[in-house]
Image (tube, grey):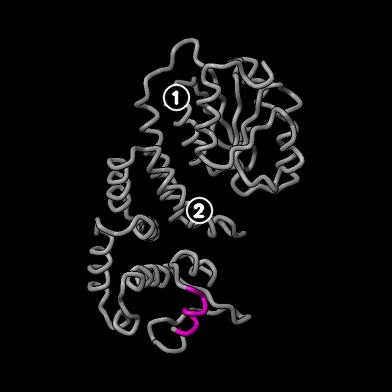
Amino acid sequence: MSTYSMAQVEALSGIKAHTLRIWERRYSFLNPSRTETNIRFFSDIQLIQLVNFGILLRNGHKISKVEKMTDDKIHELVNQILALPDQDVDQEKKEDIQSLTLAMLTMDEMKFDEIFKLHVIRKGLLGTVRDLIYPFLHHIGILWNTQKTMPAQEHFISCLIRKKIISAIDAIPHPPANAKKIVFFLLEDEHHEVGLLLASFIAAERGFKVYYLGQNVPGENIHEVLSIVNADFIMSMFVAPKADKTVRQIEKVLETTKTPFLISGNPQNFVSLIQNDRIVHLAKPESLIDFLNDNRGRTPLNGK
């Protein structure tokens, strides 16, 4: 069973820590455990309960009423809210993210599939990942940014997302023989590849030839790959890097190739490299789309 800090519960449920402390004093339903140093922590069950409560409160229900409801009644009301088609866009996005959070915590593949397919019908895969999955991953990022092992639920939901993107990539026709080439990889100790998979999908959909190496690739291997495939661009991402190590890894790659290097991640972790004319920092998926559209039929940066 995973445990969650007050900050994590606040981020995932949308309920302020101040409100949670008031509830703890006022209502019997909220009774977090405490460490030996008196720091609160919450269980999976308590977090799921609070995510549900947050959804109900944002939709007009009062805590004094909700705390007296049975679990079945709460689930019924939450499901009704999440099924509403007439919410405003921002509110709908919030509730969809909360719904995905519940699907992750309860490991409910059917619920995830239902939400994902509905969004794909409305917006396509790219729109779904950009407008739903990326905000969701950012939402649960507070779990990734702690110094503990990722909970099993996060592995579960990440694998479901990976499966959807890989399936979409497999359905894309092969590019023409003269297509520009991009090598995608994560360097050593980088394991969060959902974003990289989406980037490879974006490139493949735009007619690029994609070479996907996956996660935890030693930097010295990139030179060997480039000598074989003669790529026009390389791309990597850094989800939660250590700044010094990240810079060293990037510098090692830059020393062995003149190929333009596309990077996504917090620029503060490699600020000393941003001025390098072979580094292209991509702040968001739209930045990659713009870059690929601009370079699809042109000579690569600096002319390789």
Image coordinates of residue 202 in percent, x first then y, are 46, 31
Amino acid identity at mark 2: His
Placement of 126 over or under 184, stated as above or below: below
Please identify the residue farthest to the top as the structure is shown: 177
Q: CA distance from mark 2 to mark 1?
A: 26 Å
Q: Nearer the viewer, mark 2 or mark 1?
A: 1
The quadrant of the image that shows the N terminus is bottom left
Image coordinates of residue 139 in percent, x first then y, are 48, 57
Determine contact: label 2, label 1, CB under 8 Å: no
Reading the image, the residue beneath label 1 is: 206
For numbered disc 2, what is the local secondary structure?
helix
Q: Nearer the viewer, residue 249 or 268?
A: 268
Amino acid identity at mark 1: Arg
Which residue is drawn at the image coordinates 43% and 17% (left, top)? 175
Which residue is drawn at the image coordinates 35% and 55% (left, top)? 89
| Mark carried by residue 51 | none
Q: Residues within 10 Å of mark 1 (few under 14, many from 20)?
A: some
Image coordinates of residue 29 in percent, x first then y, are 38, 82
Which residue is drawn at the image coordinates 50% and 82% (left, top)? 21
Q: Which residues are magenta?
A: 16-22
Reading the image, the residue beneath label 2 is: 138
Which residue is drawn at the image coordinates 50% and 23% (left, top)? 210
Q: Nearer the viewer, residue 62 or 113?
A: 62
Q: Say whether residue 135 is left or right of residue 118.
A: right
For numbered disc 1, what is the local secondary structure?
loop
